[in-house]
Image (cartoon, rainbow, N blue to C red):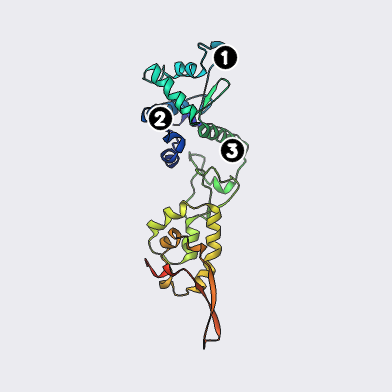
Amino acid sequence: MALRDQPYLPLYIQDYLTDEKLNMCSWQTQGIYIKILCILHKQKKYGSVLYKLNSKQTESIIKDFALILVKQIPCQMNDMENALSELIDNEVLMIENNELYQKRMLKDGETSIARSIAGKKGGGNPNLYKQTPKQKYKQIPEDEDEYEYESDNENVNENVNVIKFEKFWEEYDKKVSKLKTKPLWNKLSNKDRKLIIDYIPEYKLSQPDKSYRKNPDVFLRNKAWEDEIIKKQFKGLGSTRNIVTDKSQYKDL
């Protein structure tokens, strides 16, 4: 199903709330912006509104687009024109030639089309499409394997395996505070996840008694994988032991 046929708008909540450019706009403009996103969602070219050059009505391209949008959004013409000007000045929306578009939506639309074409040709990773013909969406049980693809992260290449939370949970082997830990893991980049998985064996050697290890949520929140593990010599024992230099490991257990 094409994105424009979906009954919902893929709104990236965190991006929306923290978008510095959007936050520079007035509250009125931000309200009109949500309406514009809904219009862009229904366009034939997802995320983009076009007008024919031979249909140009004014000397202002912004005003021309305002005339198009105000027919579908219940607001005053001057409010629409002011909102568009503000959104474009702050690069929340873009105008090129005869096209008004939202960059993220345009990219999502192109990605959706590419995946649809690849699916029809039998492309893609077969492990990600374990489904019967009647199933509508991909289904990947959480514990099926140690990797999953996270499509909501635009920085993750489709061919890169992302380390799942369950891999970390089993490797760390201190099964407490799971509800606190999993959201922290899901926010990490795959680069940090790999560093953590590589760090855990040495960390466990330094703290073989799991009761002295940080709780997994504390470990992630404090970025404990960045702590240095130093081998120290214990007198009279004739052996060395790895010690994590961060003293906070004895807190929040």
Helix, strand or loop for disc 2? helix
Measured along the vertical axis of the image, is residue 138 above or below residue 144?
A: above
Q: Quadrant of the C terminus?
A: bottom left
C-alpha distance separating marks 1 and 3: 36 Å
Instruction: Report the mark closest to the observer, 1 or 3.
Output: 1
Q: Please, what is the three-letter code of the amino acid marked with disc 3?
A: Gly
Q: Residue 140: x percent and y percent? A: 49, 49
Measured along the vertical axis of the image, is residue 100 above or below residue 222?
A: above
**Pointer 2 residue:** 34
Helix, strand or loop for disc 1? helix
Q: Quadrant of residue 37?
A: top left
Few, some or many C-alpha atoms within 10 Å of disc 1 (few <14, some 14-19, many ≥20)?
few
Q: Please, what is the three-letter code of the amino acid marked with disc 1?
A: Leu
| Left or right for 201, reference 17 | right
* Residue nearest the observer in this picture, 73 or 178: 73
Q: Residue 104: x percent and y percent? A: 51, 35
Mark toward the start of the polypeptide (1 vs 3)? 1
**Pointer 3 residue:** 119
Q: Please, what is the three-letter code of the amino acid marked with disc 2?
A: Ile
Q: Which residue is drawn at the image coordinates 52% and 86% (left, top)?
A: 235
